[in-house]
Image (cartoon, rainbow, N blue to C red):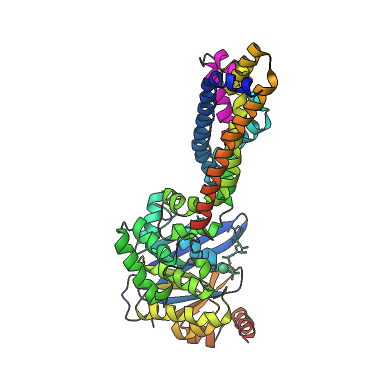
Amino acid sequence: MTAGRDAAPVLSVRGLIKRFGTTTVLDGVDLDVARGEVLVVIGASGSGKTTLLRCVNALVPYDAGSITLEGTEIGYTAPNSGVRRGDRALARLRADIGMVFQMFNLFPHLTARQNVALGLRVTRGMPRREAEARAEHWLARVGLADKMDNLPSALSGGQQQRVGIARAVAMEPKLLLLDEITSALDPELVGEVLDVVRGLARDGMTMLMVTHEMGFARDAGHRVVFMDAGRIAEEGPPREVLGHPRSERLRRFLRRIELRTE
Amino acid sequence: MIDAMIYALPFLWDGFLITLAVSGIVVAASLALGLVFGVILAFGPVWIGLPIRVFADTVRAIPLIVLIFTVYYGLPALQVPLSPFWAAVAALAAFKTGHVIEIVRGAITSIHPGQMEAAKSIGLTFLERLVYVVFPQAVRCFLPPWINSVTDSVKGSALVSLVGVVDLMMAIQQVIGRTYQPMPLYILGAMIYIAVNAALSVASRRLEARFAATVAT
Ligand SMILES: Nc1ncnc2c1ncn2[C@@H]1O[C@H](COP(=O)(O)OP(=O)(O)OP(=O)(O)O)[C@@H](O)[C@H]1O
Ligand SMILES: [Mg+2]
């Protein structure tokens, strides 16, 4: 599946090590995401999936290794330099990486339109009218043309999460990170959110996505990695990884997931 | 009784202005300093947060009178020349700053950490995160205790009379010294303080209502 995409990866993670105190949460992760690729990350609770995404978005410092976005080192001035980039440089880099959160994290004091327009106005420096027009375009894309003026508190979970997606993609990021974006939703709302993600995938958005939705991983994912205890334990096309798991741990994990989704 | 009050009023005017000036300066200075140090306490590293924490706790643990006399006698002894007025204002402002620091820190930490992360993820810098995401939400938590502390400042300003500043309180006592009629004067004084704080209450209730309306959760 990866064939045909241009050679240089959008995201490149090498030897990533992250510790919380004495526990090693990421234990040498190597990972590439090609342009236009949808890379699905699966793994048991506590295996380090969220931590991986948070490192990639420079939300947390890490202990060793390198993370580059189109060749630019993200959190630090150079690989393993230990010198964290300044606030402004981090902000600029983060502007090119979208993130959609498990708990939505919409700004409760802003309407749907303002939520999406904020980054465009402040980070991208667009005039208000242009930013709001762009926000409206994306809100319409995620099916919320009639909810632009709603505050998050006046939206359903599925609608809130679609605003969250619009907020992230309106910035036209080079990479979109999605962390279990449907796991806080009622089952009947999962579909509407995943459909939006499918649409983005069709349009060529590069995505690194943590999810427990195996059906989605199988039909929308280009590649699946299975994380276990802070390492990538298995990796390959969805059909192979999910259909023919090599390790006992992955087999057990997949059985548990299947039981959960009746 | 009423006659005594009406007789006293003109003598109280200058003192009243001093009381307003003291309260105003203290409120403004403590708001500015408290905001800065409260934000540093909430987000800064421990080594810089610790002295702020110590300052806020110390200043709030000392009786205000003791603080005022410490500054009044202490700073001149350290070769810092300070008029009684500014010594008293500095002491009151330090005391209030301790409170505002605590209120600001509390209001900021009441906001879910996910808000800061979402703000980071759309590329906002630290100051932009404060201005567009944190403060607009924190203001609801901040206002009620802060408004309380403003009324406290007005009442606390009466203590400046102890170091010889002729504020409303001192002016009242001066009039009593001439008329030997304490009751009408103290009642009049109480009424003036009540009037000022009632005006503040009304203004603050308006303010709170406005923020409650625009910043619905
Ligand atoms: N701020 C933190 N301080 C200490 N330990 C942490 C912190 N954040 C995460 N951890 C630990 O790191 C490990 C990995 O956590 P992480 O959230 O990345 O797992 P996950 O794979 O996303 O799990 P889940 O599927 O439950 O979301 C866990 O053991 C967790 O307890
Ligand atoms: Mg997680």
Residue A94 coordinates in the image, percent (x, y): 40, 59
Q: Vertically, is A64 above or below A244?
A: above
At horizontal 63% and vertical 24% (from top left) the residue drawn is B2
Q: Vertically, is A184 above or below A63?
A: below
Observer-nearest of A46 and A183: A183
Q: Vertically, is B80 above or below A239?
A: above
The quarter of the picture where residue A72 lies is bottom left
Magenta segment's dominant SS is helix
The quarter of the picture where residue B94 lies is top right
Residue B207 coordinates in the image, percent (x, y): 51, 48
Q: Report the span colored magenta.
A: B69-98
In the rendered view, does A163 fall on the left or right side of B10?
Answer: left
Q: Quadrant of the C terminus of chain B?
A: bottom right
Q: Is residue A130 visible?
A: yes
Q: Does residue A136 belong to the magenta stretch?
A: no
Q: Is residue A78 visible?
A: no
At horizontal 53% and vertical 74% (from top left) the residue drawn is A156
Residue A91 coordinates in the image, percent (x, y): 40, 55
At horizontal 50% and vertical 32% (from top left) the residue drawn is B29
For ligand 2, which image quadrant applies?
Answer: bottom right
In the rendered view, does B42 fall on the left or right side of A113?
Answer: right
Q: Does residue B73 belong to the magenta stretch?
A: yes
Residue B44 coordinates in the image, percent (x, y): 52, 44
Observer-nearest of B38 and B159: B159
Observer-nearest of A11 and B115: B115
Q: How many marks?
A: 0
